[in-house]
């Protein structure tokens, strides 16, 4: 924390020298979360004990605007309480989250260069991962054209782990070597839609006698309609569709990718007392992520860069941190209900029914697959806004699994009770969204 404050003071002193036309602002946020994990992220097995901890994000943000330019930088301290001694010289928990420069290229055009969040649509494929304390940012060059309801963004990134003198092999795990994107958004009457093209390349290599012998890049394309939304009074019809093509690797063998992700839902709002902000919202829908992998074809869809905690239950058993990727896929049928007592306090309950997309077989070789039903998850959440700067959020989730889910998990001997609970305080005085990781 001392290093964070020192960097903040340096940023202030560097940016405080500006002309009368410049605007300098400094902001921050503090998020503290306590969790009880008894099956969160990975189902807990017999003989394993639940985990409990407190962790925080302390983020300092500074912005400097002058004559068509905007420079922004944020540094953050991410730590679990107690992971360093009380008396210490330094640690490794301070990092730069964003550092970018945005410049006007005209009345409708801008270019944004540097480390930045890519947070679009409902964050299913491109999200800032706000729920995870460390969050997500890309090293990217982004060009933006915006006129009224029309938004067209395109750009790309090229990653390297160091300023090499020779060679071009990129070995940082779970990162793309290069990526390009183009996204179009528009609103016509009550219909709001967007279209996305994303192409990312992953480095591959083989090693012989301790040296790289073969290197290259496998490219995967994700084409989608991330936002499809039609408003009809208090009823909203929405959905999205993505399709993935290209190539990936199974060891040294190259595979063809052919996968998809589709979702649709209906939201109905019941206004009880508009003046007090009292309302009830009910959402019903489904999401399907294709699955099935063999030596030559990968039909398993991967939502690589999204805020996946928002989807498929809050216990993060599917598609968060690599869980359930390159597997049997998922069918998620859900019902959500949220009651707003006023503009400051809500209660929400979600129920998910999970099915595998492709067949699952038991621990013994049998011609008959198991049932596709993998289990049920119940999520209960609440949120309360104390002031415009401070809010409180919490939740409890429980997962009821089946033999099919246990087979997908490698037939591990799982505990009967799988649950998770958290309590979080959020200090974000200038941000409109006072809650994190809650989807309706």
Image: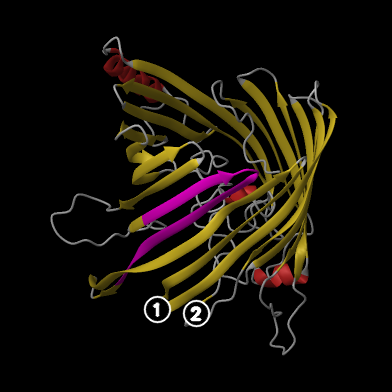
**Can you tell which mark lies on residue 254?**
1
User: Where 273 falls versus 188 (above or below)?
Assistant: above
Does residue 399 appear anywhere in the picture? no
Residue farthest top in this picture: 20
Residue farthest front in this picture: 189
Locate the N terminus and report the quarter of the image it occupies: top left
Q: Residue at x 51, y 45 (%)?
A: 120
Locate the C terminus and report the quarter of the image it occupies: top right
Measure the alpha-carbon separation of dots 1 and 2.
9 Å
Residue 376 occupies quadrant = bottom right
Q: Position of residue 314 (x, y in %)?
A: 68, 48
Q: Position of residue 326 (x, y in %)?
A: 54, 69
Residue at the disc numbered 2? 297
Of 121 and 139, nearer the camera is 121
Of 204 and 408, nearer the camera is 204
Q: Position of residue 102 (x, y in %)?
A: 33, 33
Dominant secondary structure, magenta: strand
Q: Residue at x 25, y 62 (%)?
A: 169
Region of the chain picked out in magenta, as a range: 180-205
Q: Secondary structure at mark 1?
A: strand
Horizontal relation, residue 157 to residue 365: left or right:
left
Q: Sequence order check: which comes first, mark 1 or mark 2?
A: 1
Residue 81 occupies quadrant = top right
Horizontal relation, residue 263 to residue 234: left or right:
left
Does residue 412 appear anywhere in the picture? yes
Q: Residue at x 27, y 13 (%)?
A: 18
Q: Residue at x 47, y 30 (%)?
A: 85
């Amino acid at each position: 924390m001392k290093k964070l404050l020192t960097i903040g003071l340096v940023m202030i002193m560097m940016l405080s020298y500006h002309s009368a036309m410049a605007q300098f602002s400094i902001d921050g946020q503090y998020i503290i979360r306590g969790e009880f994990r008894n099956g969160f992220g990975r189902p807990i097995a017999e003989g394993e004990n639940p985990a409990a901890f407190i962790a925080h994000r302390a983020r300092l943000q500074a912005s400097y605007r002058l004559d068509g330019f905007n420079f922004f930088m944020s540094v953050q301290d991410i730590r679990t309480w107690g992971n360093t001694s009380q008396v210490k010289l330094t640690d490794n928990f301070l990092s730069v989250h964003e550092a970018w420069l945005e410049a006007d290229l005209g009345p409708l055009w801008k270019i944004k260069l540097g480390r930045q969040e890519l947070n679009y649509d409902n964050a299913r494929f491109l999200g800032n991962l706000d729920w995870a304390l460390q969050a997500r940012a890309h090293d990217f060059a982004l060009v933006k054209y915006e006129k009224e309801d029309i938004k067209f963004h395109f750009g790309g990134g090229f990653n390297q782990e160091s300023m090499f003198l020779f060679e071009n092999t990129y070995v940082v795990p779970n990162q793309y070597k290069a990526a390009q994107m183009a996204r179009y958004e528009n609103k016509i009457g009550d219909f709001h839609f967007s279209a996305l093209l994303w192409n990312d390349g992953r480095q591959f290599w083989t090693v012989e006698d301790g040296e790289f012998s073969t290197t290259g890049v496998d490219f995967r394309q994700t084409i989608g309609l991330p936002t499809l939304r039609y408003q009809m009074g208090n009823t909203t019809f929405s959905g999205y569709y993505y399709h993935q093509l290209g190539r990936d690797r199974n060891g040294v063998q190259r595979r063809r990718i052919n996968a998809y992700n589709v979702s649709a839902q209906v939201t109905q709002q019941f206004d009880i007392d508009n003046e007090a902000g009292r309302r009830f919202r009910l959402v019903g829908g489904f999401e399907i992520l294709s699955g099935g992998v063999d030596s030559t074809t990968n039909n398993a869809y991967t939502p690589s860069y999204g805020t996946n905690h928002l989807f498929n239950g809050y216990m993060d058993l599917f598609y968060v941190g690599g869980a359930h990727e390159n597997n049997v896929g998922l069918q998620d049928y859900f019902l959500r209900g949220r009651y707003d007592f006023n503009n400051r306090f809500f209660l929400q309950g979600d129920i998910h029914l999970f099915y595998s997309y492709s067949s699952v077989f038991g621990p013994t070789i049998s011609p008959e697959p198991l049932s596709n039903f993998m289990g049920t998850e119940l999520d209960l959440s609440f949120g309360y806004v104390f002031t415009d700067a401070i809010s409180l959020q919490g939740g409890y989730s429980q997962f009821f699994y089946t033999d099919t889910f246990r087979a997908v998990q490698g037939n591990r001997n799982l505990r009967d009770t799988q649950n998770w609970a958290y309590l979080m305080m959020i200090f974000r005085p200038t941000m409109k969204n006072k809650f994190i990781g809650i989807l309706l």
